[in-house]
């Protein structure tokens, strides 16, 4: 794991962030900050997950909200069936289920052109939203209320614990993403993204790698959604399957830069923070417009994202 | 005669109502240098697309080193030892030249490397082709001839026993054609069978032990370069009645 | 039995309307390979324009749609120029183009919400609320009028594409750019025209949409699945195929709505799309 200097720097930085998180929980008491940072972390994790199939492999997923919401509803359904189930169990269940959905969806459509896959992801999200809307057990269209569990371990409040959980999950997903892109598997994915036919003829088993990529993406998105019910305490299909989640998941990596593992992180931190500021100062509807406009602008003018702009600015050959 | 490295039997490929290949037979011996020529649209690229697996044939069979590969995916065929270069180079544009070679080395030739470190292996391939000076350069910014060499290098990195070179010399200067020719001859000297598709006749004549001529999806002639040059059917195919 | 017949009839009437929504997408996605996922959002804009002029000046909504069509055409041409400059000319993969239209769709929806709110909007016209009674089945005019107009528009577009030079050039441009250039037609101008034509159809389709029922900004999203399902199911290059697929989807949705409940309707088209992609991606009548 500590192969070279960049590894040392990376893990050092992760450790520092984790410690900063702990310090945060000891110094900050205002709940608002925890909810704001939680939202940004959740967005970061979704962006990182999206980028695995989107930026690394070149297949655009429009249905991110679907995976996220299924993760959330897994928690709702399990919580209703077996009272008192601890959060880590929910997370694992969400990862398995959403990973499977990613695999299934991939198997149905990844043998076709990328465009069909993208439309299929949108279709999948709507189909699942319809299913959840019609499933009374988890509240149907009216939604479900989630009671906040009593235990919050050694933290001062439940939201603080949730924040720490989300922080660790996000850091973990970033580590996975970085390890992936630096691995043989990641190089195979990049070849698929650059030229799938040439990759196939170079010996890359493209379908298998695409399926792995889709499964991983699905699992991580499910994990991002698993704690959501405890965060909002009320889950309904409209909010869980919200298009806003889907657009953020695409916009943040594209703005940050899809080719590098740090792109979605940068994009999520910048855009996420901007969104929190806009919500507080102006309105939350404007957020949505902001993201949409940023997405269109960046795609049209700076398709390589902020990372790409930085590279060009520093004049590096690659 | 030793067992053929490639045996194509009665290959048929249709696109809708258009018959691109109409029952083509092809045999390539181990370590042989075969030239494949024919007028534009005769089906040469379709044939190698079928051989490499980029297209699936409608009828007929393809066997590589005695093994039926007709229904195998392209990546499986490459792993078995069939490599091809593309007529229009298709580099992995986000990668450097060296990184481009890592892909076939880490996938097609996985486990068959000579060097312990992949980068050393990649550099060795680059050196054999004369591209070592641009190893760290982004592959999208190469000159035409270097792009063609990279195409070949990627095919070489797959450690093939049969290489199909699809018009690697098109549009190159005379000196550049010779460079590519030397690379292919050196490769063949190491025991790799080569199918060369070209329109540049002096290259085909110099390189090939045997030449196959396609026209309108059918094989119309086969023989040594001298025999082919003197064949009236071939002349007719290229020049018309 | 009565329910059954009504379901079929409603399905056919709706299906014709769905065809009018999808014909523009059939051009942009089926012919030009441009994945305009914002197409239904433009339809919704058409609805809002019909609503504004109808409530302000009392103009008949369909009339508004027809009048607005040339403006939408110009808008389509402009949008294509941006798309071309940003994506097609540089050879960027269609993935960025996809995300571009996704962003456009999003922006349209949000601007509508910001300006007009999330309330449902309706139009008023004297044929709304009246039925034609054919004995065993009643045909609501709010479905019949769109059926007639939609059929006329779809038919007109189909005739245009198959009979006129420009129309046939549009059909050809996807298949053979070079031949088109050799014939003296500029592929970019052809595509531009085609895109404009596609967006022009959304003006009319939008006016029909708001005749059929109330409209709110996010209504377009439900039509993404329908429109793409119809274009893909019908076969990418085929307008007659698209019409048949539209009728099929219309009838299917109608049945599901009548017998399983309207909350299941959105899943029908999307489910059909997934099934088509999984089983026969070239659609019923498409070129393989």
Image (cartoon, coloured by chain):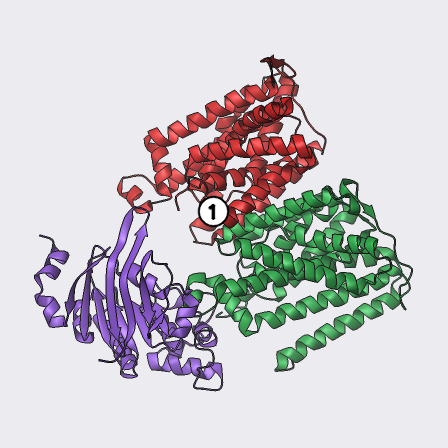
Chain colours: A green, B purple, C red
Quarter holding residue A89: bottom right
Q: Is residue C128 above or below residue C19?
A: above
Q: Is residue C284 above or below residue B165?
A: above
Estimate the x, y position of residue C123 in percent, counting from the top left.
65, 21
Q: Is C106 left, or right, of C277 in this rendering?
A: right
Q: Is residue B31 above or below residue C222?
A: below
**In the depicted view, which residue is nearer to us: B234 or B62?**
B62
Q: Is C64 left, or right, of A13 in this rendering?
A: left
Whether residue C184 is visible: yes
Disc 1 marks which residue?
C280
Estimate the x, y position of residue A112 in percent, counting from the top left.
48, 53
Q: Residue at x 9, y 64 (%)?
A: B231
Quarter holding residue A165: bottom right
Q: Residues within 10 Å of mark 1 (few under 14, many from 20)?
A: some
**Dot 1: what SS?**
loop
Q: Residue at x 25, y 72 (%)?
A: B28
Whether residue C216 is visible: no
Quadrant containing the N terminus of chain B is bottom left
**In the depicted view, which residue is nearer to us: A108 or B128?**
A108
Task: Give me the chain letter of mark 1.
Answer: C
């Amino acid at each position: 794991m500590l192969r070279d200097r960049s590894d040392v720097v990376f893990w050092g930085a992760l450790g520092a962030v984790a410690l900063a998180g702990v310090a945060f929980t000891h110094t900050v008491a205002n709940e608002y900050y925890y909810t704001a940072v939680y939202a940004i972390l959740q967005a970061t994790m979704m962006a990182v997950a999206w980028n695995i199939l989107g930026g690394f492999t070149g297949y655009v997923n429009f249905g991110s909200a679907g995976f996220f919401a299924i993760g959330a509803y897994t928690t709702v359904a399990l919580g209703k069936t077996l009272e008192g189930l601890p959060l880590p169990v929910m997370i694992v269940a969400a990862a398995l289920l959403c990973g499977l959905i990613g695999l299934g969806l991939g198997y149905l459509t990844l043998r076709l052109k990328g465009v069909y896959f993208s439309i299929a992801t949108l279709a999948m999200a709507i189909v699942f939203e319809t299913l959840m809307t019609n499933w009374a057990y988890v509240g149907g269209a009216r939604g479900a209320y989630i009671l906040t569990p009593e235990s919050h371990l050694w933290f001062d409040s439940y939201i603080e614990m949730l924040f720490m959980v989300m922080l660790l999950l996000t850091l973990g997903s970033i580590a996975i993403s970085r390890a992936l892109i630096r691995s043989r598997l990641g190089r195979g994915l990049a070849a698929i993204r650059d030229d799938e036919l040439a990759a196939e003829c170079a010996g890359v088993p493209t379908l298998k790698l695409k399926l792995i990529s889709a499964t991983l993406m699905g699992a991580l998105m499910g994990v991002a959604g698993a704690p959501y019910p405890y965060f909002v305490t009320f889950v309904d299909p409209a909010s869980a399957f919200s298009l806003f989640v889907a657009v953020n998941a695409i916009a943040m990596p594209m703005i940050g830069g899809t080719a590098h593992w740090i792109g979605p992180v940068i994009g999520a931190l910048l855009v996420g923070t901007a969104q929190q500021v806009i919500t507080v100062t102006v309105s939350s509807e404007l957020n949505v417009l902001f993201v949409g406009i940023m997405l269109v602008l960046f795609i049209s003018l700076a398709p390589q994202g902020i990372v790409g702009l930085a590279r060009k600015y520093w004049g590096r050959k690659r | 005669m030793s067992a053929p490295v490639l045996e194509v039997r009665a290959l048929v490929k249709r696109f809708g109502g258009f018959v691109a290949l109409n029952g083509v037979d092809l045999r390539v011996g181990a370590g042989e240098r075969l030239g494949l020529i024919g007028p534009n649209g005769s089906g040469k690229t379709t044939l190698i697309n079928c051989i490499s697996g980029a297209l699936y044939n409608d009828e007929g069979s393809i066997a590589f080193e005695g093994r039926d590969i007709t229904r195998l995916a392209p990546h499986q065929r490459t792993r078995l030892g069939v490599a091809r270069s593309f007529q229009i180079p298709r580099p992995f544009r986000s990668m450097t030249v060296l990184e481009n070679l890592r892909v076939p080395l880490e996938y097609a030739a996985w486990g068959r490397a000579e060097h312990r470190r992949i980068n050393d292996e990649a550099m060795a391939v680059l050196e054999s082709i004369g591209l070592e000076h641009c190893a760290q350069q982004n592959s999208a910014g190469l000159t035409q001839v270097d792009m063609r060499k990279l195409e070949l290098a990627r095919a070489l990195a797959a450690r093939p026993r049969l290489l199909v070179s699809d018009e690697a010399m098109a549009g190159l200067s005379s000196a550049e054609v010779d460079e590519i020719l030397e690379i292919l001859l050196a490769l063949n000297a190491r025991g790799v069978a080569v199918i060369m598709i070209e329109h540049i006749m002096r290259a085909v004549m110099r390189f090939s032990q045997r030449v196959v001529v396609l026209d309108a999806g059918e094989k119309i002639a086969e023989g040594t370069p001298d025999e082919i040059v003197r064949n009236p059917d071939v002349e007719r195919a290229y020049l018309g009645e | 039995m009565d329910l059954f017949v009504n379901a079929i009839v409603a399905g056919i009437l709706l299906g014709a309307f769905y065809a009018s929504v999808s014909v523009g997408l059939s051009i942009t996605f089926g012919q030009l390979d441009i994945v305009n996922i914002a197409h239904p959002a433009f339809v919704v804009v058409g609805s809002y324009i019909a609503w504004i002029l109808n409530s302000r000046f009392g103009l008949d909504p369909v009339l508004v749609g027809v009048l607005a069509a040339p403006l939408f055409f110009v808008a389509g041409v402009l949008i294509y120029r941006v798309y071309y400059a940003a994506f097609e000319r540089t050879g960027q993969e269609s993935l960025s183009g996809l995300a571009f239209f996704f962003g456009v769709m999003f922006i349209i929806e949000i601007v509508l919400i910001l300006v007009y709110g999330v309330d449902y909007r309706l139009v008023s016209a004297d044929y709304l609320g009246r039925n034609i009674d054919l004995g065993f089945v009643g045909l609501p005019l709010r479905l019949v009028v769109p059926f007639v107009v939609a059929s006329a528009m779809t038919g007109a577009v189909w005739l245009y594409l198959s009979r006129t030079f420009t129309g046939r050039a549009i059909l050809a441009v996807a298949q053979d750019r070079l031949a088109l250039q050799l014939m003296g037609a500029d592929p970019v101008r052809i595509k531009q025209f085609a895109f404009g034509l596609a967006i022009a159809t959304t003006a009319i389709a939008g006016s029909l949409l708001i005749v059929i029922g109330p409209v709110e900004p996010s209504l377009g999203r439900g039509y993404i699945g329908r429109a793409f399902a119809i274009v893909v199911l019908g076969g990418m290059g085929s307008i007659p195929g698209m019409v048949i697929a539209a009728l099929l989807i219309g009838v299917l949705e109608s049945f599901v709505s009548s017998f399983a409940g309207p909350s299941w309707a959105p899943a029908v088209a999307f489910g059909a799309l997934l099934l088509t992609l999984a089983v026969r991606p070239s659609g019923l009548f498409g070129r393989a």
